[in-house]
Amino acid sequence: MKAMLVEFENPALLARGLEELSRAGISGVDTYTPMPVEESAPRSPLPLCMFVAGVLGFAGAFALMSYADVRAYPLDIGGRPEWAWPTFVPIAFELGVLCAMVAGFIGYFIICRMPRLYDPVDECTAIGRASRDGWFIHVRAQEPGAILSARRVLEPLQPTSVQEYAE
């Protein structure tokens, strides 16, 4: 499998390159930049997953405490009602927050594809500038000829450097 790392001079050229690649139907494209590029940032599903996990954690804890208090082990303490739900809210809220945080922690690792200790793109000499002043598009070949067509699409934008390598 082949891949290509293309460096651009500024974020505007990188955004144009991403537009051209998407218009050409080339998939398997990543960016390596020192700061986020707003045009290429897809919306993350992580906040919704955290919200759903928090609501499910709250509902599950509340249901478990309600079942234990009303059905499994009912207690008559000082005229307290059989279902004293206000006492369940603080613990259920804390468990909901805990579930949301665990979902966020695990989801972050999944979305960022971590812990991936090695990627062949790390062998490229120019990738070290990605965290300082480099604006890179990384194209992985999904089908034969994708690298060649990506090169044809990006050449009119006059990239600073183009590096092909085998994965």
Image (cartoon, rainbow, N blue to C red):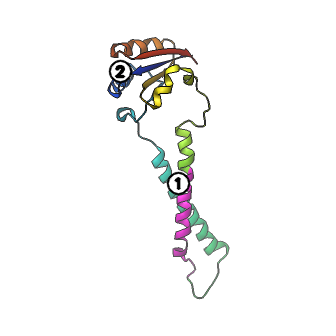
Dot 1: what SS?
helix
Amino acid tagged 1: Ala
Q: Residue at x 67, y 72 (%)?
A: 72
Image quadrant containing the N terminus:
top right
Q: Is residue 136 left or right of residue 91?
A: left
Region of the chain picked out in magenta, as a range: 81-102
- The prevailing secondary structure element of the residues shown in magenta is helix
Check disc 1 and report the residue beneath it. 100
Residue 142 to residue 99: above or below: above
Amino acid tagged 2: Glu
Q: Residue at x 54, y 53 (%)?
A: 101
Q: Residue 116: name its quadrant.
A: top right
Tag 2 near tag 1, CB within 8 Å:
no
Q: Residue 119: name its quadrant.
A: top right
How far apart marks 2 and 1 lie (CA) works out to 38 Å
The crowding category of the residue bearing disc 2, from other C-alpha atoms within 10 Å (few below 14, some 14 to 19, many at least 20), is some
Dot 2: what SS?
helix
**In the foreground, 117 or 92:** 117
Residue 43 - label: none
